[in-house]
Amino acid sequence: MIEVIFLGTGGIKPTPERNVPSIAIRIGSEIVLFDVGEGTLRQMEIAGLNPMRIKRIFITHFHGDHYLGLAAIIQTMNLWDRRETLHIYGPENSGEFISNFLKSGYFAPGFDVVVHEITGKARLQFENYEIWTFEVSHGIPALGYVFKEKDRRGNFDLEKIKSLGLTPGPWMKELEKRKIIKIGERVIRLSEVTGPKKRGAKVVYTGDTEPIDDIVEFSKRADLLIHEATYISSEHRKDSYHTTIEEAYEMFKSSKARHLALFHRAPRYSYQEYAVAAKELCPEAYVPRDFDRVFVGGMGNVIFKVR
Amino acid sequence: MIEVIFLGTGGIKPTPERNVPSIAIRIGSEIVLFDVGEGTLRQMEIAGLNPMRIKRIFITHFHGDHYLGLAAIIQTMNLWDRRETLHIYGPENSGEFISNFLKSGYFAPGFDVVVHEITGKARLQFENYEIWTFEVSHGIPALGYVFKEKDRRGNFDLEKIKSLGLTPGPWMKELEKRKIIKIGERVIRLSEVTGPKKRGAKVVYTGDTEPIDDIVEFSKRADLLIHEATYISSEHRKDSYHTTIEEAYEMFKSSKARHLALFHRAPRYSYQEYAVAAKELCPEAYVPRDFDRVFVGGMGNVIFKVR
């Protein structure tokens, strides 16, 4: 079970009602940030999220509304005597951009900030989750991200245990640790006595982009696809590298993801206006507001908790 | 009459209740910004202030809470096709810092951003106001600012007009324009037929600093002294370059300014806790909240309008 917290759901510039993009995923005690628009630190304060729990920040691209909140978060970590390395991931040039950003005032963090530049498709392995990346189409280097909670083993299955002539006991703890043990002459594998794997939650975040095939590809069997849908109509979008509600819906349907959240709506729309259009154009879509929380349990177990 | 709008009244880092420092002064149709902490753009949106009306921004110093909102404001001006030059004033190194800041992402403004570095005392003359600067003591280059609305001529005085043997008429418009005219053989000066000058409003903003003599000097006869008072007690302040409530009160009393606003309170204090302490330590002081507005008319005519 992971928790997705929408810290900023608008795009381009903030409005009184919504801030610019940032999405937090809480997994265990760790917070993973995707994009960090200006004011994200304060949004975290309001949401009751502690910036010190962030180990990694993933930035989709370097337009101001997606990264300008980075410096204040790093400075606040420093104020609180952070020593742990902070890892930041982003497309090419991220290193130079962040380095310039951190030279915009009097500031020297007392911990390492390591920037990882990613081009194309990558699979990053961490303790409890993986991040998969793909390039999107936004006119500048830009990435989409898949957050994949690691699958976990199934529960012990009493029937299977009995069928091997065993009875439950302390050997089960041992087996869990070593995955394979010997009882008498018999070799027992963990998979022999447990039920099916529990699939980890899968959440996809496109960042800003036109609709592209890779979104469909990477969103297969996702529990939640957070797709940018900056504009209600292509008339408003003109030739900008963004997506309309209808196009996001097409991507969602093709991907067979379980849920769709429409993200990064333009400042010109009120929530009401946008939500009404979304209801009409893609009835299943969810239009998050700032501070909404979504619990994603894998296997389609998704709970929307609107603030 | 000018209007002071408190856009962010906290210091160091934002809290759910208050944002980091920014103060707007509205004079005619122009907005003058003093400091521009992260999130100031959104605070302006909420306050109903149009960033396009900003001609000049004055930054006290380059700690993150005082300038990190600058890039988003410039980018939004650009989005709205600004062509007019934006002038930014700050202490030494401002040019390099702002230049780095604007190289932190994909961004090229379509208008000129001119940075003016100021050391020591300066008097800057603009159409409707002057800005006076003085150095404060904050461990890094830092400035305090005086905003001085220009004095305006007094009203026409009917008694004076009569005593010169004249009657009111279209010549008054002419005189107002030229300051000196001839009626028949007689030379008339504007000052001969008008009452005393109307003193322009004077507002002082210290930025972050220890108490220093120049604050008293520059705040003489000010209508409003906005003094940092980050800490309630010197025990909390320790040896940081900040001011306590009591010290700010001392500066205020010595300066004989008319009103004192205590600014930049630390995140550790709730509004309630801080306001109670302020009431006790300096009963006349005013503790602004974000979005409070103060109308300053000069001659002590100050109206506090709490949101």
Image (spheres, coloured by chain):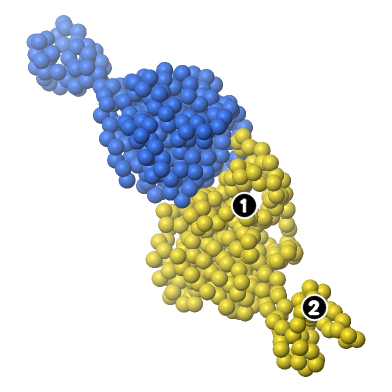
Chain colours: A blue, B yellow
Whole-number angstrom distance, CA of label 1 to CA of label 2: 35 Å
Could you tell me residue B4's position as x and y percent?
57, 66
The correct choice, above or below, for B178 with respect to A110 in the image is below
* Residue beneath the point at 82% across and 74% down: B178
Circle 2 residues within 10 Å: few <14, some 14–19, many ≥20: some
Q: Nearer the viewer, mark 1 or mark 2?
A: 2
Can the viewer see residue A261 in this picture?
A: no
Chain ID for label 1?
B
User: What numbered label is drawn on residue B52?
Assistant: 1
Circle 1 residues within 10 Å: few <14, some 14–19, many ≥20: some
* Residue A302 sits in quarter: top left
Q: Residue most toward the top?
A: A185
The correct choice, above or below, for B188 with respect to A131 in the image is below
Type of residue at label 2? Leu
Left or right: B298 as drawn, with respect to B19 = right
Type of residue at label 1? Met
Could you tell me residue A117's position as x and y percent?
55, 26
* Residue A108 sits in quarter: top right
* Residue beneath the point at 88% across and 85% down: B184
The residue that mark 2 highlights is: B175
Left or right: B266 as drawn, with respect to B207 = left
Could you tell me residue A118's position as x and y percent?
53, 23
Residue B292 or residue A107, whichever sits in front? B292
Residue B223 or residue B14, whichever sits in front? B223
* Residue beneath the point at 39% across and 66% down: B272
